[in-house]
């Protein structure tokens, strides 16, 4: 018997009490959606988990109206310290139900339980704890005394870190006094709906957080809705671009956290064993479904072969399989669509002449899987070195001088994150200074902390999440004009899309919502 | 320096000359040891913590518990040790669990040099190679644990233990010399102790070099001391004497295993690793097995390549083993004190 074939150690699903059918969470209650329901499956087994309602345009109206009521009547006038109490309560409930949330996340998303248990869920709690502390200290958010909440935030989040992205969006919005309508990704709505139960447990006032489920159209309807004051989106650059176009001229405040093609730069004096771990963690963490993943490895030429050899040896020890097994390192790809995209791009890589190497893994029969793969002999012009693959695929390039490393690292339309590996502190600082990326990790990768702002340059989006900067995305300085005239929106809605007023009603620059009243369904697709 | 006997697997110090590309003098050693890539402490500890989260259940756990026992150097290193205490230790080494004859024997008993004859006598026919199901005798030597004695005394200490029948010598390095940067002095001492390990038949007692990582303080030092000890002819590198805190930790052991892995990649030779001191529970010991298997490979989980230096660990493993066998926990009174 081989010791390394560890006996199965699956986390039990017995503590999950899932319903067969989930509705929408609007105004503090679960209600039936009026759209066509959809099924959510486990990507590891393709087994059905639950049926989930789709929010129709009317449901979105209801959710936004509930959020508006909650904003005007309770949440915005509540003392900051009291808002903080609710956030602390949510954080503690997340901790109490941590195991259940981790199991649900791994089941629905396909990520290994050790990641959902040790990374995702603890960070979710940390995010709520952190912003709970801010709720009564908004005067110090950097916007002067008495900053004002924006109103209703419409938020759309991706499938790679379902619950964590929800926390990144909801915690600062609520701390700042906004109310929220959030749409989780259609393949990973489950934990958001469990989170709705937590909100009920926490007795959060109805309407402060509303959760609407559905696909890209639902998201477009939400973000295109005139009744929201703030758009926060995390997802692909293509959809982000469509959202920015749609929001232009509406006065909605916008935060976009989009794609990335991060460079992970390894100098020849790097702590080599830790650098190998960092490279692995950079691109194979969460099956590479990470917008800030270190998908371009830039290695100094003098150690290129050694790094590649060590990397292959290390990848051969990764364990792929059942996401619920506590010893699994690499879980399932989230969906068939994503698997197809990864497969297609890797195919292009081979056609372009890069050398492919995949770890030998036993691929389970059902479900969506992709073995950890590295490409060597990659040129900067290859598609696998330019485009975001969003999967466990690493492109290895080499460089000779720090200047070349910086030039190659910055030579991308993206600018979300980067990594530097060197034992020399002065070099780390000098290189970091010249990298155009929102987050730069030195001798580590993919580390997150609620106190640290996160966001991108260029096509990776704009706005920052986390830290004090993340709070500013949900606040206006005192004295600025009100962002929204809700009465005008209500009139526009009552008039129906066909008669939606266009330019003539919006004399005041701060009443832009009416302009887009009739354009609810024109967002991008996921 | 003397040359090794022909045909010995670990030809020293030729291996040093080959790897260093020159005589192992002060300058060459310094250049080599300071040219080794650094260690990032945060990353190393993170990796060790990650390995520590492996969940070893059912059949894997049963295998691991038996293997831990077979890898133990059952140790008594007290000033108050007596021949009677050593006999009792040997008896426990041979039959760890009186209630279950299927329990494997430990790999070796580890005692002070003057106790070696007593251990050899008590073992009798059961004295020998753990690969043959027998139990070896390991002796700490070279003015253990401080190492503060002249080289002549250290060599005499070693030679006497070997002459009395010790199969393995656990020596300490001169941490004072190492920390002062006198690498060739440390190298020479190890190389000469290795010579003192030569038995009358020309074979060598296995040499475990104790780095005393708790006194070396930084991971960079541990890595350099590991390379130095291997270059100088050590068959095993061992973390600690058990007399200094911190003794063995998972990150330090991981780091030493990485050196052993790199040495194997470089030369094809397999060097052993022995964490000692502070490993008291089965749960901790299993983390070490995982770390060995995932760093250097499963083949290292054998008595000639990996040992636990421990005394109280054995009883905890026996309790866990009884639990696996019977399905319920017993208690401290169902294993013997030694």
Image (cartoon, coloured by chain):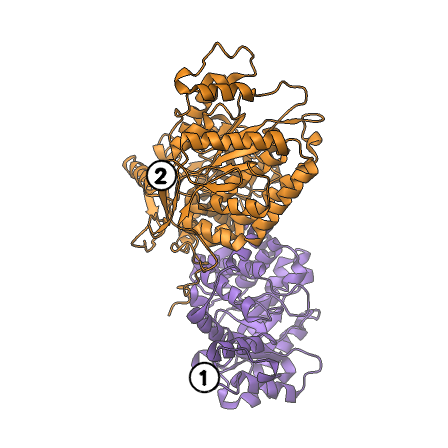
Q: What's the residue at 51%, 61% (across, down)? A: B257
Residue A281 on image: x %, y %: 48, 47
The chain displayed orange equals A
Residue to which mark 2 is pinned: A377
Q: Are marks 2 and 1 on the same chain?
A: no
Residue A351 relative to residue A156: left or right: left
Q: Residues within 10 Å of mark 2 (few under 14, many from 20)?
A: few
Residue A83 relative to residue B10: left or right: right
Residue to which mark 1 is pinned: B102
Quadrant of the frame with the C terminus of chain B: bottom right
Q: What's the residue at 57%, 75% (across, down)? A: B316
Residue A161 on image: x %, y %: 47, 43
Vertical arrangement, residue A25 with respect to residue B221, above or below = above
Secondary element at tag 1: loop
Residue B283 on image: x %, y %: 54, 68
Secondary element at tag 2: loop
The answer to whether residue B272 is seen in the rendering is no
- Labelled disc at residue B229: none
Residue A309 relative to residue A231: left or right: left
Judge by depth and name the residue closer to the eye, B241 or B17. Answer: B241
Quadrant of the frame with the N terminus of chain B: bottom right
């Amino acid at each position: 018997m081989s010791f390394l074939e560890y006996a199965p150690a699956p986390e039990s699903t017995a503590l999950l009490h899932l319903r067969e059918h989930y509705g929408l969470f609007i105004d503090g209650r679960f209600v039936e959606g009026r759209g066509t329901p959809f099924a959510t499956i486990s990507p590891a087994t393709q087994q059905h988990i639950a049926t989930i309602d789709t929010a129709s345009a009317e449901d979105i109206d209801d959710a936004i109206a509930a959020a508006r009521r909650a904003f005007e009547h309770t949440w915005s006038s509540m003392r900051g310290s009291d808002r903080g109490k609710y956030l602390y309560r949510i954080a503690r409930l997340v901790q109490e139900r941590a195991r259940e949330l981790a199991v649900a996340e791994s089941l629905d998303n396909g990520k290994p339980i050790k990641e959902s248990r040790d990374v995702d869920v603890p960070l979710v709690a940390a995010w709520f704890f952190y912003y709970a502390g801010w709720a009564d200290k908004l005067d110090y958010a950097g916007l002067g005394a008495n900053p004002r909440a924006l109103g209703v935030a419409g938020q759309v989040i991706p499938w790679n870190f379902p619950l964590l992205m929800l926390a990144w969006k909801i915690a600062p919005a609520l701390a700042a006094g906004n109310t929220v309508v959030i749409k989780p990704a259609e393949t990973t709505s489950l934990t958001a709906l469990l989170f709705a139960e937590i909100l009920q447990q926490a007795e959060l006032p109805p309407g402060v957080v509303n959760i609407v489920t559905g696909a890209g159209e639902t998201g477009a309807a939400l973000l295109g809705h005139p009744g929201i004051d703030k758009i926060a989106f995390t997802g692909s650059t293509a959809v982000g671009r469509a959202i920015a176009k749609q929001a232009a001229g509406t006065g909605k405040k916008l935060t976009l956290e989009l794609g990335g093609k991060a460079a992970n730069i390894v100098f020849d004096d790097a702590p080599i064993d830790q650098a190998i771990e960092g490279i692995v963690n950079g691109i194979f963490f969460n099956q590479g479904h990470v917008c800030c993943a270190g998908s371009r490895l830039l290695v100094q030429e003098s150690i290129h072969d050694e790094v590649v050899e060590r990397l292959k040896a290390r990848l051969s020890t990764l364990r792929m399989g059942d996401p619920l097994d506590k010893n699994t390192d690499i879980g399932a790809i989230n969906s068939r669509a994503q698997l197809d995209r990864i497969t297609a791009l890797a195919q292009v890589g081979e056609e372009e002449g890069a050398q492919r190497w995949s770890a030998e893994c036993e691929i389970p029969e059902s479900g969506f899987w992709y073995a950890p793969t590295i490409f060597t002999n990659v040129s900067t012009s290859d598609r696998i070195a330019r485009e975001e693959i969003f999967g466990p695929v690493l492109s290895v390039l080499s460089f000779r001088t720090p200047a070349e490393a910086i030039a190659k690292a910055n030579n991308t339309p993206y600018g979300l994150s980067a990594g530097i590996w060197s034992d020399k502190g002065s070099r780390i600082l000098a290189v970091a200074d010249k990298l155009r990326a929102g987050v730069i990790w030195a001798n580590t990768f993919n580390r997150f902390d609620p106190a640290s702002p996160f966001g991108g340059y260029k096509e990776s989006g704009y706005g920052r999440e986390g830290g004090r900067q993340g709070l500013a995305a949900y606040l206006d300085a005192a004295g600025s004009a009100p962002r929204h005239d809700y009465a005008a929106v209500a009139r526009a809605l009552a008039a129906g899309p066909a008669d939606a007023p266009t330019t003539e009603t919006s004399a005041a620059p701060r009443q832009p919502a009416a302009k887009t009243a009739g354009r609810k369904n024109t967002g991008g697709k996921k | 320096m003397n040359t090794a006997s022909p045909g010995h697997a670990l030809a020293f110090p030729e291996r040093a000359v080959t790897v260093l590309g020159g005589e192992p003098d002060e300058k060459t050693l310094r250049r080599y040891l300071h040219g080794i890539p650094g260690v990032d402490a945060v990353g190393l500890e993170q990796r060790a913590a990650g390995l520590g989260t492996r969940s070893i259940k059912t059949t894997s756990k049963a295998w691991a518990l038996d293997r831990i026992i077979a890898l133990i150097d059952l140790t008594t290193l007290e000033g108050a040790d007596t021949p009677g205490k050593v006999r009792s230790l040997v008896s426990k080494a041979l039959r760890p669990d009186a209630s279950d004859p299927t329990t494997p024997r430990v790999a070796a008993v580890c005692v002070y040099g003057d106790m070696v004859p007593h251990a050899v006598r008590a073992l009798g026919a059961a004295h020998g190679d753990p690969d043959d199901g027998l139990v070896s005798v390991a002796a700490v030597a070279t003015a253990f644990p401080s190492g503060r004695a002249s080289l002549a005394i250290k060599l005499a200490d070693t030679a006497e233990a070997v002459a009395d029948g010790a199969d393995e010598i656990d020596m300490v390095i001169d941490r004072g010399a190492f920390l002062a940067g006198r690498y060739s002095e440390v190298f020479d001492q190890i190389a000469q102790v290795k010579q003192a390990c030569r038995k009358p038949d020309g074979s060598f007692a296995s040499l475990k070099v104790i780095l005393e990582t708790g006194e070396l303080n930084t991971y960079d030092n541990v890595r350099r001391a590991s390379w130095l000890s291997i270059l100088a002819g050590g068959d095993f590198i061992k973390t600690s004497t058990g007399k200094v805190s911190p003794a063995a930790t998972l990150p330090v052991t991981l780091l030493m295993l990485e050196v052993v892995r790199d040495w194997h990649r470089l030369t094809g030779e397999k060097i052993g690793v022995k964490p000692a001191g502070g490993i008291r529970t089965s749960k901790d010991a299993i983390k070490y097995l995982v770390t060995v298997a995932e760093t250097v490979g499963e083949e290292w989980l054998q008595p000639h390549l990996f040992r636990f230096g421990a005394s109280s660990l054995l009883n905890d493993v026996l309790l866990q083993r009884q639990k696996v066998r019977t399905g319920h926990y017993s208690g401290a009174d169902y294993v013997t004190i030694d």
